Amino acid sequence: MLRSTLIPLFVAIAGLSFSLHAQDFYQKERKKWLAIAEQTTPKLVERLKRPLYTVTAQQDPQSFQGWKVQKSYSTDSLFSNSMKKQSGVVVDFGEHLTGFVTFTIKDNGRAVDAPIRLKFTFGEVPAEIAVPFDPYKGGLSRAWLQDEIITISEVPKTITIPRRVAFKYAKIEVLGSSVYSDFKLTDLFVKATTSVTQQASALAPATPTLIKQIDQIGLNTLQECMQTVYEDGPKRDRRLWIGDLYLESLANIYSFKNHQLTKHCLYLLAGLSYENGVAPSNVFERPKPHPQINPLFDYALIYNVAVKEYLEATGDKQTALDLWKVVKKQIEIPKKYIGEDGLLDYQKAGKEWWLFFDWRNGLDKQVALQGVVIWAYKNTYQLAKMLGKEKEVSELPTLIEKMTNATHQHLYDAEKGLFVSGKDKQMSYCSQAWMILSGVASKEEGKKALLQVFAHENAIKPGTPYLYHYVIEAMIQVGLTKEAKDLIVNYWGDMVKKGADTFWEVYDPKDDFLSPYNAYLVNSYCHAWSCTPVYFIRKYPQIFQQ
Amino acid sequence: MLRSTLIPLFVAIAGLSFSLHAQDFYQKERKKWLAIAEQTTPKLVERLKRPLYTVTAQQDPQSFQGWKVQKSYSTDSLFSNSMKKQSGVVVDFGEHLTGFVTFTIKDNGRAVDAPIRLKFTFGEVPAEIAVPFDPYKGGLSRAWLQDEIITISEVPKTITIPRRVAFKYAKIEVLGSSVYSDFKLTDLFVKATTSVTQQASALAPATPTLIKQIDQIGLNTLQECMQTVYEDGPKRDRRLWIGDLYLESLANIYSFKNHQLTKHCLYLLAGLSYENGVAPSNVFERPKPHPQINPLFDYALIYNVAVKEYLEATGDKQTALDLWKVVKKQIEIPKKYIGEDGLLDYQKAGKEWWLFFDWRNGLDKQVALQGVVIWAYKNTYQLAKMLGKEKEVSELPTLIEKMTNATHQHLYDAEKGLFVSGKDKQMSYCSQAWMILSGVASKEEGKKALLQVFAHENAIKPGTPYLYHYVIEAMIQVGLTKEAKDLIVNYWGDMVKKGADTFWEVYDPKDDFLSPYNAYLVNSYCHAWSCTPVYFIRKYPQIFQQ
């Protein structure tokens, strides 16, 4: 999740100044946490994978983004014939893979007497190897697009492209070569990596085929994003965001059970927290671990919930106790915005912080903000109890009650039967979901509220699979289980039908070209926050078995 | 020197088949020669060089190829300010350099949150950093053009571009970066290399300034081409051709005196000779030494002359004796074409071999072929005598006499006072030069012949500095010393006046855009065969001191 142009830049600047003059809150613990993060860095599992065959990309209005691929000829033929005559060839690796690509060039007859210029283009979806990247009008760096131009000065030569790529397809174009000599591409492989070490258990045989497919593609997505951290996407941004970590770790609990990775990430985030104590919205691992100075209100609070879920899944009290100082600090964030009336000053908070919740133009976040704080406080209090620390957060029950009451009183529109947000009393999926998850809405109110927004054409729908996760969780909590299943079958199942190998960062059934970055080719097509059907299907199997 | 489209491809194919079915003539010696070549590989001298300042390229009809550069601002400013705001900046290293370029990228404020895509373009002359390379219509590989696109996934990062480049100017364009973060280019340097270890002596103080400049630029050219072999050009083709070796080693004898490099190259060529015994026209050093299968008649014979010159300069009889077997084999090449009348069947030879002499469309090579064979035979016989081996080549004096007489009888047009070549009795600089160097022409005849072609508007002029070398040597031999000096002053001096830092592969005073490859940007602008003013100025100082 990269900020897009939707997010005003002043937030970033506010965030920066915000951390500059604070003393280091974790002065004592930072080094230790980073050392534990380093010790727990997962060893990646490597697989050498070669392409299965060549394909041709064909325009097809029925296919996702207007492109499909068709099997063409064998890699035996690719590897044994003139590469000059195969310029533009596309190979299909048969599955989404993440890693470093290596290729070998050899003479084809006479010694190669001039350097060779090759362009490799890697694509997660067919459009990426069919549609030119330039001119590029996107809001994110052009460098995210996965094309690399390589000069080969000596032949024979084996070269590893010095950039990790995430792809299923690779296109190889000859941009320069001698007319007096020819060459062959005699090998091409990727050293594909993941930190998944143990396969997920099989679903019950009775599970319908489409559900099995959704689960499998969700597992593929998760596996590809599980590297040395929970990445948001192996193509983009390739880093650890708290929001993605939370959803991935939930899916992981019910599938690959690599709890060590979760522990590693929680420590890394703790060790790289801002000096004022706020958990960093996201961190980079390389060249050495460092945070992006980009504080994000809701993500900081979600850190606490991720710690709680980790403890519940593992029983690892030592880690939770060790990170308790971070958890305790996050609950301070909302306090300065909570008014006497129990309502957050969401406008002030929105000026001083980046509030995320979803990519959706015009989404009013007042209700969601109330919801996420109450939800995080409740989870934090549960965590405190599990650790015997409830005295240290004894203010939480009162705060929760006060905020719950205030939210219900001021933001519930009893007449309409749903929660409304902001001055314009906006109706959104987002608001209802957070009211259910926070417990502000009773089960009945929540069910009604959801059904209301589903029925309202003008209600603001989720813009990302990230928010769909919270909506579905809320639906299940209020008993809309069939509807939850249908949503997964319709939304994620639709991606399956459109040929997804992994789930996409952004998906609008009515617009294959939707992009928060003004460039659909830069979207990530293997994105952590879209993997959560794995969690739902495996946590609530009874919902999905018919 | 790369074959251009001027040379028919069948020659290459003939050359290939030519070597395929022979037994290895040097089976016993090859390994030993290659081992000695390896032992004598020169250690490169490295210098770290940073740019002096930034420049802007400006269109100027008076400047070479229509472009000049103007000093802009300091590298301190370049290295300390936003690189996003400096996209397209051009830096000037102040001199031609050959080596690997390293740069460092750092954050400029907030942590860089997206990969960066940079394009580096390296130029020997201003046009290369001012004129777009694409679309490219040249006959040689597009990959010779020195532009590299680099993705930087982690910041800070120091990267060495994995391709050796030859340049004075570097342009740096930002093709992709985040709008949310900025970066600086905090360092940029080249590890420049040469195998020159000892400076050339100073010219006599009385030497005119322009001659000193020509000498210095010739030395720069030679130094840049002297790497682990005598390269033809450090930009292109970066390899050892016999023709270039010969001219470079001559210039080296009178300047840097790195005779070890000459020895290394002579052994490398011997060790990589074709199986039928012919010395290879050119060889590649990497990834392991190998020849191009591309036999070249005149170059094979020039190998012998290079050995003789090496022996004369060094007195290293051991090397010359060790390589004698190769020398002896080269004199066999012409024999099958020498008719009863003492004339070579140049048409048959031209079908079976690549005859070079010069890049010039329509040049008839009959006379030059007679000349180069007689010249090489004479030099070989001198070499034999120096080694006490004249009995082994006792046929040479008779052959030389017979060919000399036949050439004079059949190809000298006494009426016109010059040598005419082929069916159309073509008049060319090339023919007269080779008749003088071979001794077919008497001194008087040679002088007259040269003055005749100089006066004939339709006479075929040299197309390259390579042939100019032989013409000037011939002029000096027949006493046209003032004219020889004037030619150097006019031809090379003209390059100096046009801003050359090193001498160019191709130069036509009337056409800055001439290219044998249909793309002037792919021409080499630091080319070995253009360095020989160094040889003339230093071998014949009396000619140049006024």
Image (tube, coloured by chain):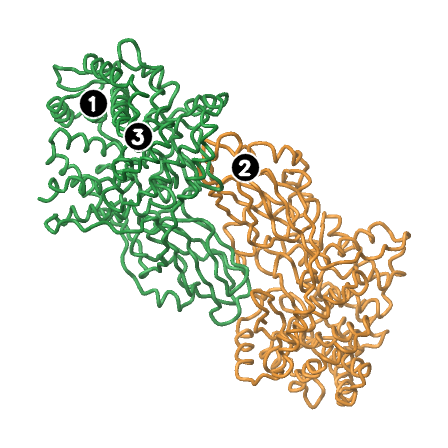
Chain colours: A orange, B green
Amino acid type of disc 1? Answer: Met
Chain identity of mark 2:
A
* Circle 2 residues within 10 Å: few <14, some 14–19, many ≥20: many
Amino acid type of disc 2? Answer: Lys
Q: Position of residue A85 (x, y in %)?
A: 54, 32
Chain identity of mark 3:
B
Chain identity of mark 1:
B
Mark 3 element type? loop
Q: Quadrant of the N terminus of chain B?
A: top left
Q: Position of residue B240 (x, y in %)?
A: 38, 37
According to the picture, the residue beneath numbered tag 3 turns out to be B359
Mark 1 element type? helix
Residue A51, by quadrant, is top right
Outermost left residue: B546
Disc 3 to disc 1, C-alpha distance: 19 Å
Q: Position of residue A207 (x, y in %)?
A: 88, 53
Which residue appears at 38% of the width and 18% of the height?
Answer: B351
Disc 2 to disc 3, C-alpha distance: 30 Å
Q: Point out which mark residue B435 bears.
A: 1
Outermost top residue: B340
* Circle 3 residues within 10 Å: few <14, some 14–19, many ≥20: many
Vertical placement of B325 versus B259: above or below? above
**Tally of marks:** 3
